[in-house]
Image: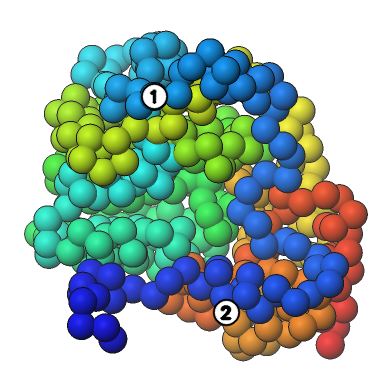
Amino acid sequence: MHPWISDRADSFDSSGIRRVFDLAANLKDPINLSIGQPDFDVPDEVKQAAIEAIESGKNAYSPTQGIGPLRERLQAQVGKQYPTHDNRDVFVSSGTSGGLMLSMLAMINPGDEVIYLDPFFVMYPALVQMCGGVPVPVDSYPDFRLDPSKIEAAVTPRTKMILLNSPANPTGVTASAADLKQVAELAAEKQIALVSDEIYSNFHYDEEFVSPAVYNDQTIVIDGFSKSHAMTGWRVGYVHGPTEVMAAMLKLQQYSFVCAPQPAQWGAIRAMEVSLDGYLQDYRRKRDLVVQGLSDCYELVVPGGAFYVFPKAPVESGAAFVEEAISRGLLIIPGNIFSKRDSHFRISFAAPDETLHRGIELLRELARK
């Protein structure tokens, strides 16, 4: 290791998803079921709003907390969702990843423990370690359910934060309202920070979306426009929660990200007016297509949200299975990138139907083998 590299940078590996892309670089016409972003483009009216902002000179830094009109819209939306919360502030972050990073930096001291479910979004352990915190993954196999008793059992005097993600990446599993309520009440009772990563809140197929913030008014909620409006490259997220915590996160944003890109924030205002119903129906149909196509030959949990399925590999190692799939032209992600276990793999069904049909066919063939 180079003598200048910090322990912080050396404490975790670079994202294993990148390795999959490297393996796939020389494939001619891959069946790509690996991408964690919608397969539709940014809605035209959102693009137009950003173009107008650029052309009318709205290209400078915005206030750190976001442009006034967007914050007002978001504050009104949050006020409507949580009418009984009297000190819930909102600010615009540089993507949800920026919001996650700021939440860790604002609340985690070296040695503090952060509880989250395994399988997990790849960034969670890395962000905790970046702040000197201790990642505490809670095994959720085989059904990937948020089990309040397992969360409670993981709590120690050093627990500072519980990090929830529902609907979840990589499993697509949605937590039940009853389980969320129990965990939210546990966090309130033990005075543990509760952070809810709700970037997939718009992708809910079987019942209404529920946030743990309904049951715990101190919950820090992180959401954004990346997945819902295909704006992954625009870097517009938002965070809402207790005033003092938001103020601490904003102070850190001033000295790091500065602000979310201003033209993209004007696009986000327009995005709040776009109906997502058509996309949602389409994704529900794609979910059903994949589940029906694979459930007789793979062990899998039906995802209630997001756009992922996390089946068990038909051989012992998920990573070995993925290498075999990639050699046949199918791009999927090994489960060990998201987990301490190497038994599963992730499919993204945010893909054209034709790609899904080809992928299902090849996965059925591999299972028979």
Q: Which residue is mark 1?
A: 60
- Residue found 63% across the figure and 70% down from its top: 21
- Give the Cα distance between marks 2 and 1: 48 Å
Quadrant (top left/top right/bottom left/bottom right) for the C terminus: bottom right
Tag 1's secondary structure?
loop
State the mark number for residue 297: none
Tag 2's secondary structure?
loop
- Residue found 61% across the figure and 53% down from its top: 36
State the mark number for residue 343: 2
**Percent position of residue 28, x then y:** 84, 72
Classed neighbour count for the residue bearing mark 1: other residues with Cα under 10 Å, few (<14), some (14–19), many (≥20):
few
Quadrant (top left/top right/bottom left/bottom right) for the N terminus: bottom left
Query: Of marks 2 and 1, which one's residue comes earlier in the chain?
Result: 1
- Residue found 76% across the figure and 57% down from its top: 291
- Asked which quadrant contains residue 178, the reply is top left
Classed neighbour count for the residue bearing mark 2: other residues with Cα under 10 Å, few (<14), some (14–19), many (≥20):
many
- Residue 15: in sight, yes or no? yes
- Asked which quadrant contains residue 260, the reply is top left
The front one of 56 and 237 is 56
**Percent position of residue 165, x then y:** 44, 48
Q: Nearer the viewer, mark 2 or mark 1?
A: 1
Q: Are marks 2 and 1 in contact (CB under 8 Å)?
A: no
Under mark 2, the amino acid is: Ser
- Asked which quadrant contains residue 315, the reply is bottom right
Under mark 1, the amino acid is: Ala
Residue 344, compared with residue 81, is above or below; it is below
- With 7 as the anchor, is 92 left or right in this view? right
